[in-house]
Image (cartoon, rainbow, N blue to C red):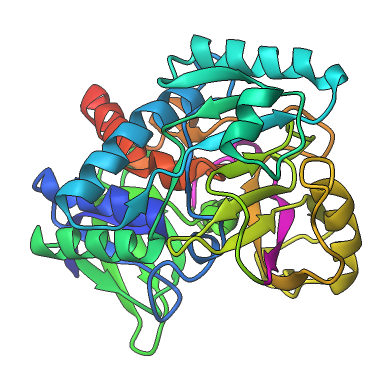
Amino acid sequence: MEQVDCVVVGAGVIGLAVAREMALQGRETILLEREAAFGTISSARNSEVIHAGIYYIKDSLKAQLCVEGNRLLYEYCRSHQVATHAYGKLIVASNDSQIDDLRAILYKAQNNSVPEMKMLSGEQARALEPELRCEAALLSSTTGVVDSHGYMLSLLGGFEDAGGMVAYQSPLLSAKPIGKNAEGGFELEIGGADGMHIQTKLLINCAGLSAPAIARCIEGLPKEKIPKAYFAKGNYFSLSGKSPFSHLIYPIPEPGGLGVHLTLDMGGQAKFGPDVQWLEIETEGQIDYSVDVRRGEGFYAAVRTYWPGLKDGALQADYSGVRAKIVAPNTPAGDFCFDGPQQHQLHGLYNLYGFESPGLTSSLAIAKYLESLLKESL
């Protein structure tokens, strides 16, 4: 039976970053992906925004890893010829009653050591964006967008250059601990056309939406240690015609998300979203990614709070994505969860739960943080 140092499950952006880091550290690593290509699920269904780390609770993993990940991602993309565009972001108070909310967001950003944040008056914001309606705004200069496919392709190349191997259409069916508390590693049963059994010292679950389901395939992992998966769908509508804005435009956040905001792609085309649509489903396989055009009515109302010039018929249903949440609706947002041996007593097993936004921005920092956890456990 083949034996390797590390197996990473899930070839989304976080799985790719983690697998690359494991291979760069000299570990013989296999990356398992159930689909026929990398990055085809959540990593292909997002806004591609490079977040600054503004909204998160002080000292949370999201705050720490987003701020660090923002810096690392821009540096990586510069050195690896991956396209980014630092458009900058305006968070807007559309009326006087939201100005205190804006000040609270600035306070959070300062506590998180987010660089290049500036409070603007309504007049100053409109000088930047004449079509904008607002009473005040926050300018985040380090917010931008990245060519996420190009970034993932680069991570994959780095992983393979470091000796890593990707196995597509190879779902993990089961993992059996070897020895007491998996001190000898894990024996894995892997599906696919050929199927195979391998042994690994490290097993890292980066399966995103399916991370809790993958965890249930691991023998000896207490079921009470596996969080319930919740699915929050975000729908996007694209703008027909040229965007009147040169910055990303965000309203005050709403429960479950950041509100219906305007983002720009690498070519400057505008899209709006995501909204928050909680799905009453049990598994990822039940997700319907189609966008209900009727939700556009709510988009028009939300967008016109900061862009009253949006014309009827200008929005087209585009695409959707689903956030990998481990907290229920109407509860405070959850943090990134690295569920390791200290939590479940199985050596060499790390389950990454709840890695929604800002996962893309934080991906390189997540990989480095996980490596630090591994070194601490040795």
Q: Is residue 189 left or right of residue 91?
A: left
Q: Where is residue 215 in the image (x, y as percent from the top left)?
A: 53, 51
Residue 148 percent location from the top left of the image: 40, 60
**Compared with residue 357, is residue 211 higher up or lower down, i.e. above or below?**
below
Quadrant for the N terminus, please: bottom left
Is residue 201 visible from the viewing direction of this image?
A: yes
Residue 334 in sight from this viewpoint: no
Relative side of 288 to 216, left or right = right
Q: Is 16 on the left-hand or right-hand side of 318? A: left
Magenta stretch in the rendered image: 219-240
Which residue lies at the image location 61% right of the left edge and 20% below the top edge? 120
- At horizontal 37% and vertical 35% (from top left) the residue drawn is 70
Identify whether 337 is placed above or below 108.
Answer: below
In screen coordinates, is 199 left or right of 363?
left
- Front residue of 283/241: it is 241
Please give the name of the residue rendered at 18% of the width and 65% of the height, measured from the top-left corner. Answer: 157
- Residue 102 in which image quadrant: top right
Q: Position of residue 222 (x, y in %)?
A: 57, 40
Residue most extreme to the bottom: 193
Please check the rendered image and state whether residue 251 is part of the magenta-colored stretch, yes or no: no
Instruction: Say which of 217 and 96 sits in front.
Output: 96
Residues 272 and 257: in front is 272
* Quadrant of image for the C terminus: top left
- Residue 35's place in the image compared with 275, above or below, is below
Asked whether residue 228 is drawn in magenta, I would say yes
Closer to us: 226 or 157: 157
Total number of numbered discs in the rendering: 0
Give how far across and how far down residue 214 sits, in percent. 52, 57
